[in-house]
Structure formats: structure tokens, C-alpha cells
Image (spheres, grey):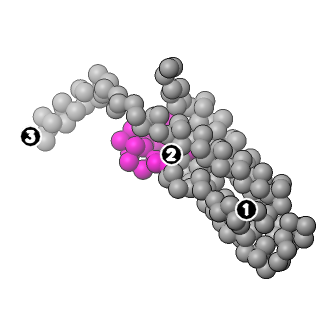
Amino acid sequence: MSEPATINPRIVEALYCEALLLSDEVRAAFTLSDKLDSDYAQDEDLARISLSSEGLRTTTRMMHAIAWLLNHRAYFRGEINEMQLRRNGRLSPDMRLSDSQESALLSPATTRLVDATRRFYERLLRLDQSWRFTELAAPSALQSLRDRIERRITG
């Protein structure tokens, strides 16, 4: 079994660009709520509720994905440290879920888009989980020196 790829700035930037494009598609798909297809929805009210519910789940999923990616970008830019990233940069496994009964009332194009966001989120989850299984890196020589100086100063 090969080792998982480490998360690096190039991977995060590529995923961030992909997330922005996907989010824009989601926004467009769920903003146009008047595009209900009567072939896929027998009850228009139920279809509108399904569209709203799935739209909320899908946009929330993408917001969490983008937040995770922004935390990693901040880490790679030195704006937050690794401990802050590990504490605050977590993905919830519950965000990948959708209600299949409500999804059945959506058009095939919207269903494909929801599935694409779910697959994207699952990719991020796999990256997040493999990254979390890695040990905290040993502090660098510079960080060790800073820690020793700080301990001496504080007593």
C-alpha cells in the first residue's frame, strides 16, 4: 500500500479553484428555482421544497469545503500554525449526506450536480482523514530554540 499524498499548497490551490467553480454552478442551479421540470415532479409544492432543502444541503456542503480549503491556504501562508489548523480545520463526515427521497424529485442535471459536490466533499474528507492520521511533525530546530528561550523567560 502506498503512502497517502501529503497536502501541499499546489493541491490546496487546485482544489480551491475547483471548489469555487463547483460552488458557482451550485449557486446558479439553486438560484433558478423556477426551473422545476414537471416531468420529474408530480407535485410542484413538494418539488419546490425538495429543491430548497437539497439546495441548502448542497450549498452548506460547499461552504464547509471552501472553509476547510481556506484554513489550509492560511496554514501554508503562515497565517495560522499547525495546531490551529488541526483544531479548527476539520471536515464533518455528515456533510456528504443527502436525502435520496428529495433528490428523486430534482431534475437529472441538478441531481448530477449534487452528486458532484458529494464526490468533491468525499475527496476532501479522504485528504483530511489521511492528513490527520499523520503524526504531528517534530518541531524544527528553530521552533525548538524558540520554545527553550520562551521557557527560560517565563521561568
Residue at disc 1, secondary structure: helix
User: Which residue: 53% across, 36% down?
Assistant: 127
Residue 35 visible in this rendered orientation of the protein:
no
Query: Which of label 1 and label 2 is nearer to you?
Result: 1
Give above or below for 71 relative to 27: above
Type of residue at label 3? Gly
Q: Amino acid at mark 1?
A: Ser
Tell me where residue 110 appears, x and y as whole percent. Answer: 79, 57
Which mark is drawn over residue 103?
1
Image: magenta residue range: 69-91
CA distance separating discs 1 and 2: 31 Å
Q: Where is residue 38, by image quadrant?
A: bottom right
In the rendered view of the protein, which quadrant contains the C terminus? Answer: top left
Q: Which residue is mark 2?
A: 71
Q: Quadrant of residue 41?
A: bottom right
Nearest the viewer among 118 and 137 is 118
Of the numbered discs 3 and 1, the one sitting upstream in the chain is 1
- Residue depicted at x 42% and y 50%: 88
Between the residue at mark 2 and the residue at mark 3, the CA separation in whole angstroms equals: 34 Å
Q: Is residue 25 magenta?
A: no
Q: Amino acid at mark 2?
A: Asn
